[in-house]
Image (cartoon, rainbow, N blue to C red):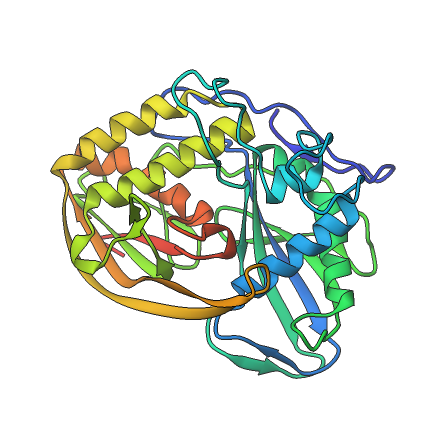
């Protein structure tokens, strides 16, 4: 059984290895889990226009602080690189050159997505709730106890340059219907047993904008993405503007991300061929769109300079035959948890999916 269990007697998690999925576009028991973190700020907390980069940066620093055993300044060259929880979650090392049967990888996607509060600069008053989500993929789910501890420390040490402290109050596991199930609290700081899987119903579930689900009719000939945070698709390292976007570019980005995450973090290499078939079939899709380009500016403490996070926002509808839409649906449904495009780990490329009837 592919389930994450946290016993009352020990803090470490045990996870059975994921069972390979059949070569079918309809998935079940996916090794993916979303968690909701609720904290109370102790002092007024000014949040930037987009808090994803802030939270990701401080999460990484806190995770490294509690996980790093060697205290080396950089991960490359560390003798514990392939076993360290920090590197496996936050700086996933690619396989050695020549180790992969199909190609060499200079980098692979990290097995987490940090979903910040809603965009827009605002101030949380003392006692207000700061709520954010974290998606974990594959073997990264094993590290949930350590991640909770790291986030608890991150919040206690303070957020932003003002180091505003906050208290982690509750952690919920969030299911595919967006129902939150409490698994940890400030008063009971032991992780409760819970499923750590994402289940896609074979009857073609379509997630609504609340993350819930409904059964779609098999005759659907279109899917619409409501894009909430900038979706930045790239070709040869360059961003694609609104006029340059194509259905194939979107499908390829989502399918490759899913396949790589499943292969490198869940041990399921067979997703690659399914992704290639899906990308090839997307050539005949058409689309309509109501998109605009949007830029966010953030300060990178690592690079000591301001950087621009740009991408498209709005509605993007894909049109195809019922068979094409049926094959595409579970992949785009899954993309709601994994996000798409550049900087997905800090919450960029977030969207919700709907059919024509929604």
Left or right: residue 123 versus residue 150 is left
Of all residues, the one furthest to the top in this rendering is 101
How many marks do you count on the picture? 0
- Between residues 215 and 322, which one lies in front from this camera angle? 322
Q: Quadrant of residue 185?
A: bottom right
Point out residue 249 in the picture as x, y percentages from the top left corner.
Answer: 24, 43
Point out residue 117 in the picture as x, y percentages from the top left corner.
Answer: 53, 67
Q: Which residue is at a point 79% across and 45% down the rendered structure image?
A: 71
In the rendered view, tell whether residue 244 sits above or below residue 205: below
- Between residues 237 and 51, which one lies in front from this camera angle? 237
- Between residues 325 and 218, which one lies in front from this camera angle? 325
Q: Which residue is at a point 46% across and 47% down the rendered structure image?
A: 337
Quadrant for the C terminus in the image:
bottom left
Of all residues, the one furthest to the right in this rendering is 9
Q: Is residue 118 visible?
A: no
Point out residue 166 in the picture as x, y percentages from the top left corner.
Answer: 74, 70
In the rendered view, tell whether residue 231 sits above or below residue 46: above
Q: Quadrant of residue 37?
A: bottom right
Q: Is residue 262 visible?
A: yes
Quadrant for the N terminus in the image:
top right
In the rendered view, tell whether residue 324 sits above or below residue 40: above
Point out residue 237 in the picture as x, y percentages from the top left corner.
Answer: 33, 47
Q: Which residue is at a point 25% across and 61% down the rendered structure image?
A: 315
């Amino acid at each position: 059984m592919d389930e994450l269990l946290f016993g009352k007697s020990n803090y470490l998690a045990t996870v059975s290895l994921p069972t390979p999925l059949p070569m079918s576009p309809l998935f079940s028991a996916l090794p993916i889990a979303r968690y909701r973190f609720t904290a109370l700020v102790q002092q007024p907390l000014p949040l930037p226009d987009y808090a994803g980069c802030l939270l990701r940066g401080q999460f990484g620093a806190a995770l490294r602080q509690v996980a790093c055993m060697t205290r080396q300044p950089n991960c490359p060259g560390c003798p514990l690189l392939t076993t360290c929880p920090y590197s496996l979650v936050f700086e996933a090392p690619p396989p050695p050159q020549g180790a992969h049967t199909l190609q060499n990888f200079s980098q692979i996607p990290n097995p987490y997505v940090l979903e910040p509060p809603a965009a827009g600069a605002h101030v949380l008053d003392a006692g207000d709730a700061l709520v954010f989500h974290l998606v974990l993929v594959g073997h990264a789910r094993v590290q949930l106890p350590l991640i909770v501890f790291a986030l608890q420390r991150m919040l206690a040490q303070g957020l932003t340059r003002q180091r505003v402290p906050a208290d982690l109050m509750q952690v919920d596991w969030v299911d595919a219907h967006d129902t939150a199930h409490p698994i940890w609290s400030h008063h009971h700081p032991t992780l409760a047993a819970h499923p750590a899987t994402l289940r896609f119903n074979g009857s073609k579930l379509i997630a609504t904008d609340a993350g819930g689900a409904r059964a779609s009719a098999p005759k659907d000939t279109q899917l619409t993405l409501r894009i909430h945070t900038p979706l930045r698709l790239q070709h040869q390292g360059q961003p694609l503007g609104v006029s340059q976007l194509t259905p194939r570019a979107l499908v390829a980005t989502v399918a490759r991300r899913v396949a790589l995450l499943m292969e490198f973090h869940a041990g399921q290499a067979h997703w690659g061929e399914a992704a290639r078939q899906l990308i090839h079939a997307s050539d005949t899709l058409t689309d309509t769109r109501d998109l605009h380009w949007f830029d966010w500016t953030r300060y990178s403490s690592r690079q000591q300079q301001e950087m621009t996070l740009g991408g498209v926002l709005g509605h993007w509808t894909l049109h195809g035959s019922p068979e094409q839409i049926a094959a595409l649906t579970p992949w785009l449904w899954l993309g709601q948890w994994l996000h798409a495009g550049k900087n997905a780990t800090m919450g960029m490329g977030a969207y919700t999916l709907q059919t024509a009837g929604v």
